[in-house]
Structure formats: C-alpha cells, structure tokens
Image (cartoon, grey):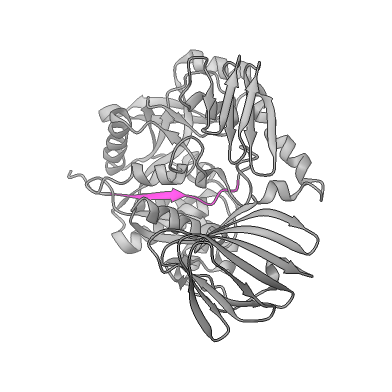
C-alpha cells in the first residue's frame, strides 16, 4: 500500500481562559506567544509543513478569529487548503464532520485527515513523526486512530485510553475510554501500565469516518452536509450556513464515534506533549534556569525557585518566592501557587460575574484587526489614546464617526492618509487632524509596519460609532 499525503485539520476556534490573564475569550491561548517568537497555532502549522508528508492544512475556526488565523498563517508562510468558519459552537463531532466532507470533496473519500488541536505544545522530533507515520499506516489499513500519550504522572486533567490487542506495526485496539479520574484512580491507571492519556489528536480515513458519523449520529452528518453545501465564500474564508449547522447536536467526536465504533485504534506515543491547560503545565514545558524558574524577557528574579514569571508589558521583579506563578498582562496581574493553577478558572468566573471586572475576562487592551492591531494606552472622560500598527500594504476601511474627532501622529513608517477629498503622505514625527463626521482612511504603502498614536476626543468613543463605507475585508 503506497503512502499518501495527509490533510491536516487544525481546530482553532476555542475560547479558553485557563491561562488568564494572557488568554481571554477574545484572545485565546492558541494565538498568543508565551515563551517563543511563534504562537501555539503557528507552531502547529509548522509541524505540518513537510510537503512530502502533508497537503496544505484545513482550519476550522469562528468568525471572530478569521483574520488572526489568516495573518498568523501568512506570517509563517503556511499554505492553507481552506478556512471553515463555524457560525455557532457545536463541539468537535459536527466540526470534524464538516471538515471531512470538505476533504472528501476536494481530495476524495480515500484521503486521510489528521486532526490537531491548535493549542498543544509538542516536541516534534523523530519520535513524534514515527508515531505520525504509524498512525497513517494504521488508518490506511482501515482504522480510526487516536494518539495516546505515554503518561508520566497520575494526571487528573486528562481522559485515559485503555489499550487492547496489539495491531501490526505497533498500534493497539482501544479497549475503552475513561473519563478524567480523581487522584487515587489515576494512580491505579498509571500502575496498571495499560492506560494512555487521551490527547484529542486523530488520524482518520475520511470515507470510513463519514460512514461511522452517518451510522451513529445521522443528524450530525445531515447538518454538516447541509451547512457545507450552503456555505458562502467570503474572501479567503468559507462561512458555513448558520441555520443548517445550528441543527447539529452538540456532541464530541469521542462520544459520537470513538466510544461506539468497532474500528478504533490507538498509537502509544512517547513524545513530549502538553495541552497547556494551566500555568503549571506552561512551567513544566518551559526552559528553566539554574533555580528551576521559567522566565519571560520582562522578568528579573532573586532568591526565587521553581517559579513561572511572565509579562506581556510591564517588567516584573520577584524576590524570595518558590513554586509560584506571576503573570502580568497590560491590565491585570495573577499571582498564585503553581500547584493551584487549576483554580484560575474559578477566579475568571468570579471576575466575569461582576460588571466592573467582566471586561478583564473578555478582551485584551490590545486587539488584532485584519490590517494590524490596536492597543489602548490611556483613557479618560471624553478622550482615549491608542497605539495603532498597520501592516505593510494594509489599510483601514473608508470610514467616519458621528461623535468623535481624531489626531494621528506617525511614530514609525509612512502613512498614506485620505481625509475628505485630499490624500497625502505622512512621515515619522508628522501628524494630522481628522475632523468629526469627515470620511477618512489610513493606509501603509511602505515595506515596514506603520506605527501611530491616535488620540480620540468626543462625547462617545465606542467602536460602534464607526461607519464604514468601503472595506476590503467585507465589514461594511
């Protein structure tokens, strides 16, 4: 049987907040840079970058993250076969059914699809790719394959897979799936030597997977088929039909297929893996100094051991601490014991319950746009100061505001500014005034990012006072 290219399916729509304050609903962990120059999503794209092994990836995400997905893929020169936009959240079974139908349409029903989360940290060395090839061969032989991670501790944050009979090449049948256990039960599972962590990664023959979805969850298959058939093309994105997709049951692929099929197999996988579901797992996977600390670039420590200190903006100085996490965003700081990292979710719930602190759980002061980013620097009564970064060749929409005027000061790069009927170039240290109610547009015609300071003044400064008349990103 000849080897064939694998179509990666990357799930990138999650809105987890377990790594608050850096990860929030509007800026989840898969798109953030924690300890390196690339986000977890970009690292996932890089793992499937071998064109001898992989076809271009298919991304499943939501409308809110669509430009972030496209921008981050472009930054690492990762070709994509499609970006499917889920109109509503419906768990993994409907999402993967749509992805499989799209792959069947574009690559044929005999294609293989590898399902990857966009927010896992993986050591993608020789052991990892040996597991990928074994999973590919096992899937080609007619199995729905999951990856089971060799456990290194009695973890209670993961589900487990009990291995069954050995299959040719080194994979095993799946005896059963076990929900996340308590500590005592996890120790029993680890001691037996028969259990693996459930990674949530799969290698699937597309035709067989669709047959099993249709057999066990026909409503999921029907909704996915209708949503894809009525999908609307929008720039580089495919918007699934909302009415059709919303009819799909909210069910995971584990419950829908893997716990019911007779074709499940598992590849025991010994590569280093973490779902980075808490700050202690970020510490565990990070590069440590001689005292066991994992530090970001804006951190200084003394007499401190086995701690995680990260900052997005301000510089952190930590003294005399042990086994703690200190995490700073632009507008919030979290301090707690690493051993209690699983409790961050409860803190987020408490913050979200109060109108005064709810915004801290939803979005960062820095938000990402299809043309670049906007960061709030200072705000007060009738004014707000923002830092704008416009990427080369990009431009904001032709727009106006009913309740505010703006001042733009160029800090770096060159700006092409249209105000009313006049267009002019602004260089570093030059500024311009945008009167209330006047049509205006900002463009970066240069080769480097354009950075500006924007000062807004007026009686109402919210984004919904932006009236777009022309927009290359379909937001009019």
Is residue 315 found inside the magenta-colored segment of the image? no
Work out which quarter of the rendered image holds the C terminus and state it. Answer: bottom right
Residue ID at (57%, 63%): 87
In the depicted view, which residue is nearer to us: 241 or 454? 454
Residue ID at (37%, 24%): 270
Q: Is residue 276 above or below residue 26?
A: above
Expressed as whole percent of the image width and height from the top left, the position of residue 94 reads 51, 55
Would residue 199 appear left or right of 331 to someone viewing this image?
Answer: left
Q: Residue furthest left?
A: 2
Work out which quarter of the rendered image holds the N terminus and state it. Answer: top left
Expressed as whole percent of the image width and height from the top left, the position of residue 34 reads 51, 37
In the depicted view, which residue is nearer to us: 251 or 75? 75
Quadrant assignment, res 255: top right
Expressed as whole percent of the image width and height from the top left, the position of residue 12 reads 49, 50
Is residue 9 found inside the magenta-colored segment of the image? yes
Q: Residue furthest bottom?
A: 421
Expressed as whole percent of the image width and height from the top left, the position of residue 202 reads 41, 41
Quadrant assignment, res 383: bottom right
SS assignment for the magenta stretch, majority:
strand
Q: Which residues are magenta?
A: 6-15
- Asked if residue 36 can be seen in this view, the reply is yes
């Amino acid at each position: 049987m000849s080897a064939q290219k694998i179509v990666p399916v990357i799930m990138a729509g999650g809105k987890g907040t377990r790594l608050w304050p850096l990860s929030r609903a509007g800026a989840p962990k898969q798109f953030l840079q924690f300890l390196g120059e690339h986000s977890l999503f970009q690292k996932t794209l890089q793992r499937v970058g071998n064109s001898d092994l992989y076809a271009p990836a298919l991304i499943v995400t939501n409308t809110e993250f669509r430009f972030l997905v496209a921008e981050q893929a472009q930054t690492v020169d990762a070709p994509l076969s499609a970006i499917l936009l889920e109109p509503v959240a419906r768990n993994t079974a409907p999402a993967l059914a749509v992805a499989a139908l799209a792959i069947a349409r574009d690559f044929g029903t005999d294609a293989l699809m590898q399902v990857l989360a966009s927010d896992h940290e993986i050591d993608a060395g020789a052991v990892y790719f040996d597991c990928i090839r074994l999973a590919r061969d096992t899937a080609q032989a007619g199995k729905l394959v999951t990856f089971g991670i060799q456990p290194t501790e009695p973890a209670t944050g993961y589900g487990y897979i009990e291995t069954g009979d050995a299959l040719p090449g080194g994979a095993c049948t799946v005896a059963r799936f076990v929900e996340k256990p308590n500590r005592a039960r996890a120790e029993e599972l680890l001691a037996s030597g028969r259990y693996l962590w459930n990674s949530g990664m799969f290698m699937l023959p597309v035709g067989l997977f669709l047959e099993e979805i249709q057999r066990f969850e026909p409503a999921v298959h029907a909704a996915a088929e209708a949503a894809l058939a009525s999908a609307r093309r929008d720039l580089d994105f495919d918007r699934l039909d909302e009415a059709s997709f919303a009819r799909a049951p909210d069910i995971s692929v584990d419950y829908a297929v893997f716990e019911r099929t007779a074709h499940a197999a598992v590849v025991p996988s010994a590569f280093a893996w973490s779902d980075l579901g808490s700050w202690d797992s970020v510490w565990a996977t990070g590069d440590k100094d001689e005292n066991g600390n994992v530090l970001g670039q804006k951190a200084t420590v003394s007499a401190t051991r086995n701690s995680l200190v990260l900052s997005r903006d301000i510089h952190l100085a930590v003294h005399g601490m042990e086994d703690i996490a200190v995490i700073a965003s632009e507008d919030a700081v979290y301090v707690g014991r690493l051993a209690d990292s699983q409790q961050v979710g409860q803190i987020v719930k408490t913050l979200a319950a109060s109108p005064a602190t709810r915004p801290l759980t939803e979005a960062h002061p820095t938000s990402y746009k299809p043309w670049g980013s906007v960061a709030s620097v200072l705000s007060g009564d009738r004014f707000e100061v923002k830092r704008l970064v416009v990427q080369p060749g990009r431009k904001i929409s032709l727009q106006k505001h009913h309740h505010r005027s703006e001042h733009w000061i160029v800090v770096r790069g060159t700006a092409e500014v249209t105000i009313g009927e006049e267009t002019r170039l602004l260089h570093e240290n030059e500024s311009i005034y945008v009167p209330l109610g006047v049509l205006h547009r900002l463009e970066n015609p240069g080769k480097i990012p354009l950075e500006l300071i924007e000062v807004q003044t007026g009686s109402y400064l919210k984004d919904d006072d932006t009236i777009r008349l022309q927009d290359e990103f379909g937001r009019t």
